[in-house]
């Protein structure tokens, strides 16, 4: 039976897109602040919590998937460091 699950690169692309959304929120907050609207900057930063939480969930899922499919963890890379 064919494996129809997304590939690791597809998951990484999704993780990247989520990270870019968080970066866009930071840019928006900075623009509000530069425009003299500190309250709106604060609101955007506060609301970014939801995207940051989703990004962290995606990060954890991606790490689990790498371990499941490739048998690797971040510790494996650390062990190779001089």
Image (cartoon, helix red, strand yellow):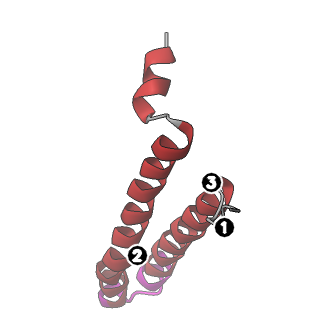
Neighbours of disc 2 within 10 Å: few (<14), some (14-19), many (20+): some
Q: Residue 26: percent from the left, percent from the top?
A: 46, 72
In this rendered view, identify the residue nearer to me: 55 or 29: 55
Badge 1 vs badge 3, beta-carbon distance below 8 Å: no
Which residue is denoted by mark 1 in the rendering? 4
Which residue is the site of mark 2?
A: 51
> Alpha carbon of mark 1 to alpha carbon of mark 3: how far?
12 Å
Q: CA distance from mark 2 to mark 1?
A: 27 Å
Instruction: Give the answer, above or below, for where 34 lies relative to 74.
Output: below
Of the residues tagged 1 and 3, which is closer to the observer? 1
Q: Quadrant of the N terminus?
A: bottom right
Is disc 3 placed on a helix, strand or loop?
helix
What is the magenta segment's predominant secondary structure?
A: helix
Tell me residue 27's x, y (percent). Answer: 52, 74
- Quadrant location of residue 11? bottom right
Q: Residue at x 29, y 89 (%)?
A: 39
| Closer to the eye: label 3 or 2 | 3
The residue tagged with tag 1: helix, strand or loop? loop
Residue of label 3:
8
Residue occupying image coordinates x 47% and y 45%: 68
> Which one is earlier in the sequence, the residue at label 3 or at label 2?
3
Give the quadrant of residue 52: bottom left
Specify start and end residues of the magenta stretch as a single range.
30-39
Please determine whether, in this image, residue 27 is positioned above or below residue 47. above
């Amino acid at each position: 039976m064919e494996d129809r699950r997304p590939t690791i690169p597809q998951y990484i692309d999704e993780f990247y897109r989520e990270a870019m959304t968080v970066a866009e929120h930071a840019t928006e907050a900075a623009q509000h602040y530069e425009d003299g609207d500190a309250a709106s900057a604060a609101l955007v930063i506060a609301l970014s919590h939801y995207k940051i939480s989703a990004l962290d969930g995606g990060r954890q899922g991606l790490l689990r998937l790498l371990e499941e499919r490739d048998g690797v963890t971040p510790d494996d890379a650390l062990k190779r460091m001089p």
